[in-house]
């Protein structure tokens, strides 16, 4: 390399380093600002809703069709919902019109589909539940998760400032080499809050609360393990489905997992203790879901309420 070219290259690298440093400083400032706003926001619980809700679910297969249908059964008469789903779709890909959504036709071939932007622009929803793609680290690194969370929240808030907006905390693959429970414990603060929700709060006036489904799953698994099994449930794998060849599906819940997540949504959205709710429900297509035993259902309901009570970001009073 010629000396002049080398100097130019070094100067270029220096400029890139300055840009990167500025970006890190901006991100840190943005995160701190969001954390400060969060502290003030979550210090005061939301008022419990006084009527049935109209809910919009945006996401992918960790929403699915059956979980919102179970939520509607738990909530009772008057609860309504719509959704837009894809296969592993990020909030960015749902937002950008020129980005194809894998599985769009297949996942939205049902009566509850309504195009997301068109639906939210009506201002007719009491609650919006936003679901980021898995893996959350990839969503942050490659899909600008915080930015698009803020965009969706802002769209709903602009149409109706009474809409309650939630980030649905999901989970990662059960075979994650870092340990499934360890990552659930660590990722909430590090990624879901620190890298997604708090920066989004700094970028929009819309309040964003939390549906801590990953935390609930981890707490339930720990309760099961401590008891040496409950009602035939012995490990986290009993919450997840199996592939057609019989091998474990490491990310998608089965009916028991869907029920646990539906309970979590119910408790957060309605501010109601789920203990005593029915556990024999149907799937979205009307077929009976595999029901947890009465013992398992009771533990699930108790765990949900305990977790919700210690997470002020849900907006539910402890």
Image (cartoon, rainbow, N blue to C red):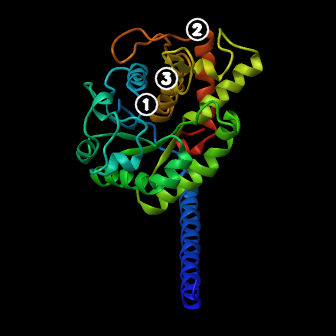
Q: Residues within 10 Å of mark 3 (few under 14, many from 20)?
A: many
Residue assigned mark 2: 293
Task: From the top left corner, tell me how far across and down residue 270 is, in percent.
Answer: 45, 32
Residue lying at 31% horizontally and 25% vertically, measured from the top left: 78
| Up-down relation of residue 6 to residue 278 (above or below) | below
Kindly check if marks 3 and 2 are in contact, taking CB atoms under 8 A apart as contact.
no
* Residue 185 appears left or right of 314: right
Task: From the top left corner, tell me how far across and down residue 102 is, in percent.
Answer: 35, 37
Dot 3 falls on a residue whose secondary structure is helix
> Total of numbered circles in the picture?
3
Of the numbered discs 1 and 2, the one sitting upstream in the chain is 1
For residue 258, which numbered disc appears in the image? 3
Of the numbered discs 3 and 1, the one sitting upstream in the chain is 1
Residue assigned mark 1: 61
Q: Nearer the viewer, residue 144 or 276?
A: 144
Dot 2 falls on a residue whose secondary structure is loop
Dot 1 falls on a residue whose secondary structure is loop
| Up-down relation of residue 231 to residue 100 (above or below) | above
Task: From the top left corner, tell me how far across and down residue 281 is, in percent.
Answer: 44, 13
Distance from the alpha carbon under mark 3 to that under mark 2: 14 Å
């Amino acid at each position: 390399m010629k000396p002049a070219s080398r100097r130019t290259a070094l100067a270029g690298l220096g400029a890139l380093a300055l840009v990167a440093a500025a970006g890190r400083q901006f991100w840190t400032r943005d995160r701190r600002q969001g954390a400060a706003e969060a502290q003030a926001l979550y210090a005061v619980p939301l008022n419990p809703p006084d009527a049935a809700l109209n809910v919009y679910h945006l996401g992918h297969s960790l929403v699915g069709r059956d979980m919102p249908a179970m939520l509607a059964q738990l909530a009772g008469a008057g609860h309504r919902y719509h959704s837009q789903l894809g296969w592993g779709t990020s909030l960015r890909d749902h937002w950008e019109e020129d980005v194809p959504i894998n599985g769009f036709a297949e996942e939205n071939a049902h009566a509850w589909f309504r195009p997301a932007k068109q639906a939210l622009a009506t201002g007719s929803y009491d609650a919006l539940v936003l679901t980021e793609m898995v893996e959350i680290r990839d969503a942050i690194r490659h899909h600008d998760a915080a930015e698009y969370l803020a965009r969706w929240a802002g769209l709903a808030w602009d149409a109706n400032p009474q809409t309650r907006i939630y980030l649905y905390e999901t989970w990662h693959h059960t075979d994650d080499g870092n340990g499934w429970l360890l990552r659930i414990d660590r990722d909430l603060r590090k990624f879901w809050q620190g890298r997604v929700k708090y920066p989004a709060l700094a970028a929009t006036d819309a309040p964003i609360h939390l549906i801590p489904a990953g935390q609930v799953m981890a707490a339930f698994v720990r309760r099961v393990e401590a008891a040496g099994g409950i009602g035939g449930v012995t490990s986290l794998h009993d919450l997840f489905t199996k592939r057609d060849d019989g091998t474990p599906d490491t990310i998608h819940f089965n009916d028991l997992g869907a029920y646990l997540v539906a309970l979590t949504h119910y408790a957060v959205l309605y501010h109601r203790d789920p203990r005593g709710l029915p556990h024999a429900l149907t799937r979205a297509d009307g077929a009976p879901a595999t029901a947890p035993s009465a013992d398992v259902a009771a533990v699930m309901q108790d765990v949900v309420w305990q977790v919700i009570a210690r997470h002020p970001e849900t907006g539910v009073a402890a």
